[in-house]
Image (spheres, rainbow, N blue to C red):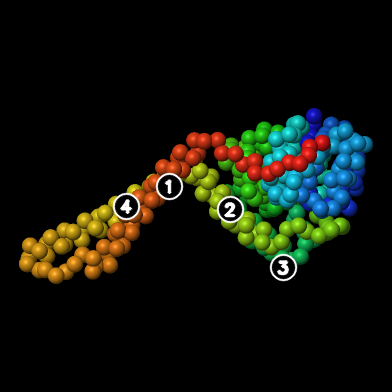
Amino acid sequence: MNLSIVIPLLNEEESLEELFTRIDNVCKTSNLSYEVWFIDDGSTDLSWSIIENLKIQHPQIHGIKFSKNYGKSQALHAAFERTNGDVIITMDADLQDFPEEIPELYKMVVEDNYDIVSGWKKKRFDNVMTKNIPSKLFNAAARKVSGVYLHDFNCGLKAYKKQVVKSIDVYGDMHRYIPVLAANAGFRRITEKEVPHQARPYGTSKFGTERFVRGFLDLVTLWFVSRFGGRPMHFFGAVGTIMFIVGFLSAFWLGVSKLIDVARGIYGHLITNNPWFFIALTMMLMGTLLFIAGFLGEMIIRTNREHKNYNIDEVI
């Protein structure tokens, strides 16, 4: 199979039939064999009923229904486990992404041998203050921290080699950082393609400005995990050891100073009256705790952590 098209959605009943019709026309015109995975992330409208009706008419359609809203990352994770195409394309269900871009994205992966092709909505039709400006700041920070130079990390329209989505683990809110996760896994042939964008024709956006706050926090997490995720002792153990040594040497110097005072016949100066005593003690305790944290981290990563924190009601 040439293509697996993965579409997470939440309350998009107005757009689903039109979206699939356009996908079907594009793939048939380009002679591409394909399957479509709709992931209903807890919709409260008729989205799932529409997917079921489409499935009856078109066997290449598959659907996953979550019991509640778990988020886009979990939706992608569930679909990535089941895709069969050589190239996986993700896109949003709100018709702001253009299915007509699918053949060119497929070509760039298959013929140009890119691991990932990420869409770049250079000209956006979103609110300037609540989306465009925060998005530019977010993308600039993401490029700087991750070292992956894409203009639009948040664009839902992306194409992947099958090996990429089968090798990475998308969890939390990490869907926007899939190119970074892939780069950390060794897939370095990442590029972007300028794609058209249009205003949402139906419904309302499911993402608010708070996604940028979560995005920055996830970026910090990703930076740390990418550098120390496989060796937490190298960070916590090193910092803890340094803090313990500094605290111990400070306490040792206080003890030596006390002995020197006693040798000189100077009495009455209690070590506990010196603020450095409490600083040294605190550093020794924190150093010990950080070292233990590093040790526990080493033990944890030796277990197979499971990120499947969602419940599926139905798969068709």
CA gap, disc 2 and disc 3: 22 Å
CA gap, disc 3 and disc 4: 47 Å
In which quadrant is the N terminus drawn? Answer: top right
The amino acid pointed to by label 1 is Ala
- 59 left or right of 75 in image: right
Q: Which residue is mark 1?
A: 293
CA gap, disc 2 and disc 1: 22 Å
- 166 left or right of 243 in image: right
Q: Which mark is residue 191?
A: none
Q: Which residue is mark 2?
A: 219
CA gap, disc 3 and disc 1: 41 Å
CA gap, disc 1 and disc 4: 14 Å
Q: Which label's residue is closer to the chain start, 2 or 3?
A: 3
The amino acid pointed to by label 4 is Phe
| Location of residue 204 in the rendering, given as x and y in whole percent from the top left corner | 81, 60
Q: Which label's residue is closer to the chain start, 2 or 4?
A: 2
Q: Give whichever of 242, 62 is nearer the camera.
A: 62
Badge count: 4
Q: Which residue is mark 3?
A: 129
The answer to whether the residues at label 2 and label 1 have Cβ atoms under 8 Å apart is no
Q: Residue at x 30, y 58 (%)?
A: 281
The amino acid pointed to by label 2 is Leu
- 312 left or right of 61 in image: left
Q: Residue at x 70, y 50 (%)?
A: 71
Q: Residue at x 65, y 41 (%)?
A: 308
Q: Which label's residue is closer to the chain start, 3 or 1?
A: 3
Q: Which residue is mark 4?
A: 244
Q: Residue at x 60, y 57 (%)?
A: 216
Q: What is the secondary structure assignment of the residue under circle 2?
A: helix
Q: Which label's residue is closer to the chain start, 3 or 4?
A: 3
